[in-house]
Image: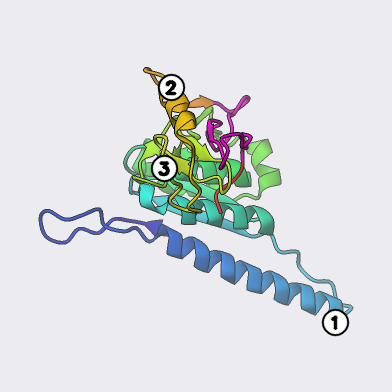
Amino acid sequence: MLDHVESYGEAQDEAPIGLVGCLTKSLCYINRTTVHSAALASNTEEPTVLVDPRILVLSVSPDQSSTYIPIMNSIFSAQKLKVTIDICKIYGPDNVFLQQAAHLTGGSYIHIERPEALLQYMMMSFLPPLGIRQLLSVPTQDRIDFRAACFCHKNIVEIGFVCSVCLSIFCQPVPVCSTCRTKFPIKTLQRLNASRPITLPPSTTNVAHPPPRVPSAALGGQNGTGPPRNGTVQ
């Protein structure tokens, strides 16, 4: 699949990318094929071919923060279906969400430095199955960007505040959660605002010690005593 940005006219808002639709359709097709193969295997004595589903994304567009939630849901669905997502970054800066997709599903994320060698990358890095890639020394990611997008402004943030009820992410403390409508006490908001750091840490981190995918700072519940929890975005 190829995710792209189409431009119409001169000044326009951020055009939507087709990545989310491609991922969901691919996962639906893989699920249907896997279920069909399992049904045939149970109804016949003939040996069946094991399905090893993989998805290859050819990326030429930057991150679009508004698609954070559906992309992460697609990644979690791929994990459940045991689908490997490979990313071939052909053009532009590194894509934060696609880095996470490759890392969380056990795939490869390769930023092509020489476009004329695209065929060689495709044959040697993405065509072999996962077991063979270890023998071929396929390039791996040394550093992965684990930043998330906030629910309020759809901006990619390095430090955010998480609702302790629904785990929604916000770039700043809010009096009312826009997702579950939970109200937070004023004292909790004042404490969180006073504890906000002035300088932000680096946006990338080592793969050997990745931080949680969701920032650890949490807003309290109705009484301000809600425990901070880490979790995934639904």
Asked if residue 120 can be seen in this view, the reply is: no
With respect to residue 152, does 83 lie above or below? below
Q: Nearer the viewer, mark 1 or mark 3?
A: 3
Separation (CA) of disc 2 from disc 1: 55 Å
For label 1, the SS is: helix
Relative placement, left or right, of 55 versus 186 is right
For mark 2, what is the residue? Answer: 202
Separation (CA) of disc 2 from disc 3: 18 Å
For label 3, the SS is: loop
- For the residue pair 34 and 13, the one nearer the viewer reads as 13
Mark 2 or mark 1, earlier in chain? 1
Q: Reply yes or no: does residue 6 show up in magenta.
A: no
Residue at 34% across / 45% down in the picture? 153
Percent across and percent down for residue 74 are 54, 57
Q: Amino acid at mark 3?
A: Cys
The stretch in magenta equals 206-230
Mark 1 or mark 3, earlier in chain? 1
Percent across and percent down for residue 43 are 85, 82
For the rendered model, the colour scheme is rainbow
For mark 3, what is the residue? Answer: 150
